[in-house]
Image (cartoon, rainbow, N blue to C red):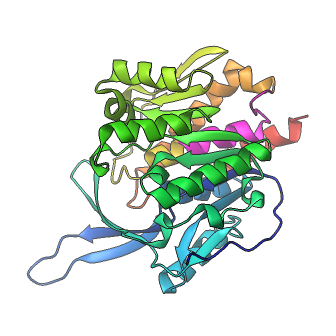
Amino acid sequence: MAARSRRVSAPLVSVVCFGEVLWDVFDLDPPTRTSGARFVREIGGAPANVATVLARLGVDVRLVGGVGNDRFGRDLRTALADEGIDVTHLVGLPNRTGLAFVRRDKKGEPSFLFYRHDTADVSLTAANIVPAMGKARFALVGTSTLMTRALRAGTRAFADAVRAAGGALVVDLNVRAHMWDNHDEMRARVAALLRRAAIVKASGTDLVALGGDLRRGEAWLLKHAPNATHVHTRGGRGARVEGPFGTVHVPIPKSDVLCVDATGAGDAFIAGVLARLAKGGAFPGSKAFTQTQVWHEALTLGHRLGEKAIGKPGAVKGVTGLGPLRRQLERLASTNP
């Protein structure tokens, strides 16, 4: 039987991230005749990556997910708490903590080998969800939480808790079509979550997976999330946001940073967007949320963080030296009425 979350209260935070929490195990060097491969573990799982970057930017953030009551789970909880993340609602489960082995090609693009069958990160259920988990202005959920029946029910319960608390659901379309047995089921599950969304973040890869190509993917997304604000990333073509305020496009700035590992670029990007919105009080329904300058700054910050993320192996390893950005955000918070 799955463990129930402790019935504890929780303060309202700016952002809560829900979903997979695990260790990414990076293969640093291929084995040779004289030495074995070297591995290093780093915080992993998109929600955990986003929460880590938000905490480093000074945003109050909570992480909700399942970790094992094993050594890996205890170490992971400690590592996240040391980042300044509220881990009160990380649920300890009897399942093993999830692992993902990561190898990178010469361009820094990752490939994954998952050890996540019945692991804690995919075993959170509706019974583990309590109302306090949803007490946030923004709640980030990825579509990878829809792949198992139990976690899908947990995701619905979490989204209900967010709505009850008056929060805005942010859906990150981490669509991995090859991991689904049925394409139509995938689209149906994603569409059901999108109907709850206030903000949707989609990459070109996500849209192709959902629609077959970019044009049809964008049309499909607009059909199922017509009232949401859409944030689209296009790799080297930059990012754009579309909402009731119109369209804002921000190209990627020129950079000399070598892409060592692209694993966490998208996670760092959405963390930057949410940090700018949260620190500036730009919540759905506010005047600031409809200002194009706010969104231009949000996308720009997202690009800067994504650039940092690709510089070192590990989704958040390179996202450091954030003092100037953090001070800029604090100035926003101090002037926010």
Q: Residue at x 62, y 36 (%)?
A: 196
Q: In the shown orientation, is residue 69 left or right of residue 62? A: left
Residue 164 covered by magenta stretch:
no
Q: Position of residue 291 (x, y in %)?
A: 72, 20
As drawn, the residue found furthest toward the left would be 33
The span picked out in magenta is 270-285
Q: Residue at x 64, y 67 (%)?
A: 128
- Front-most of 186 and 86? 186
- Front-most of 313 and 115? 115
Q: Is residue 337 visible?
A: yes
Residue 184 position by quadrant: top left
Q: Is residue 321 visible?
A: no
Q: Residue at x 69, y 47 (%)?
A: 160
Q: Position of residue 73 (x, y in %)?
A: 53, 79
Instruction: Please determine whether, in this image, residue 58 is positioned above or below residue 84.
Output: above
Q: Residue at x 34, y 27 (%)?
A: 211
